[in-house]
Structure formats: C-alpha cells, structure tokens
C-alpha cells in the first residue's frame, strides 16, 4: 500500500488563511475543485507550488499539485 499524500489549498482573504485539503479520495477532490472554480469566478489568482518550490500561475485545478495558493487580485487606481 502506497503512502497517501494530502494536498493543500490555502485561501488568502480578509479572514486570514483558510485551508482545504484533498487526497486520492474523489469526494475531497470534488470539494477542492468546486472551491477553486468559485474563487476564480471571484477574480482570485491561483498559484500552484511544486514539491521543490517552483511556482506557476494556473487557471485549472490540478489534483496532483502539492499546494495551491488562492489570493484575490490586487486592484488599485
């Protein structure tokens, strides 16, 4: 039996740092995927963080990403 790796989505917002986790279980992945899509619709930016620290802006949920950080876009004027 392989080791189960839990993946993390951190949501940065006015309430602080909320965390959603998922693993190979379909139900936990569905919740994370839905949250990801909802946040993109609210103009959040998603950054996937690789195991060795590489960072990539993403527009689609990747269930294999080690960590995804969701943050609101900064607007100014």
Image (spheres, rainbow, N blue to C red):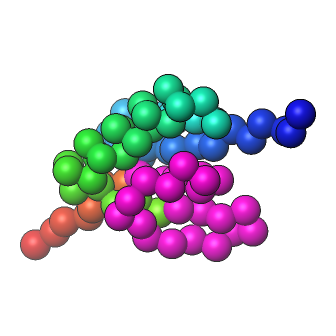
Say above or below: 46 vs 52: above
Residue name at image x 26 percent, y 42 percent: 38
Residue name at image x 75 percent, y 68 percent: 52
Residue name at image x 35 percent, y 38 percent: 35
Count of numbered labels shown in the rendering? 0
Residue found at the far front of this picture: 1
- Which quadrant of the figure has residue 16? top left
Residue name at image x 22 percent, y 56 percent: 43
Say above or below: 53 vs 14: below
> Within the magenta stretch, is there residue 69?
yes
x and y percentages locating residue 60 in the rendered image:
38, 59
> Can I make out residue 17 in this image?
no
Which quadrant is the N terminus positioned in? top right
Q: Is residue 36 left or right of residue 43?
A: right
x and y percentages locating residue 21 in the rendered image:
57, 34
x and y percentages locating residue 40 in the rendered image:
27, 53
Residues rendered magenta in the picture: 48-70
Residue found at the far right of this picture: 1
- Closer to us: 21 or 69: 21
Q: Is residue 31 left or right of residue 74?
A: right
Which quadrant is the C terminus positioned in? bottom left
Say above or below: 43 vs 19: below
- Closer to us: 39 or 74: 39
Residue found at the far left of this picture: 77
Q: Is residue 50 left or right of residue 38?
A: right
Say above or below: 57 vs 34: below
């Amino acid at each position: 039996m392989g080791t189960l790796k839990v993946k993390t989505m951190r949501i940065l917002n006015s309430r602080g740092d909320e965390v959603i986790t998922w693993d190979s279980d379909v139900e936990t992945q569905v919740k994370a995927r839905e949250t990801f899509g909802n946040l993109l619709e609210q103009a959040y930016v998603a950054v996937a963080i690789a195991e060795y620290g590489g960072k990539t802006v993403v527009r689609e949920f990747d269930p294999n990403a080690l960590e995804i950080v969701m943050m609101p876009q900064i607007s100014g004027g």
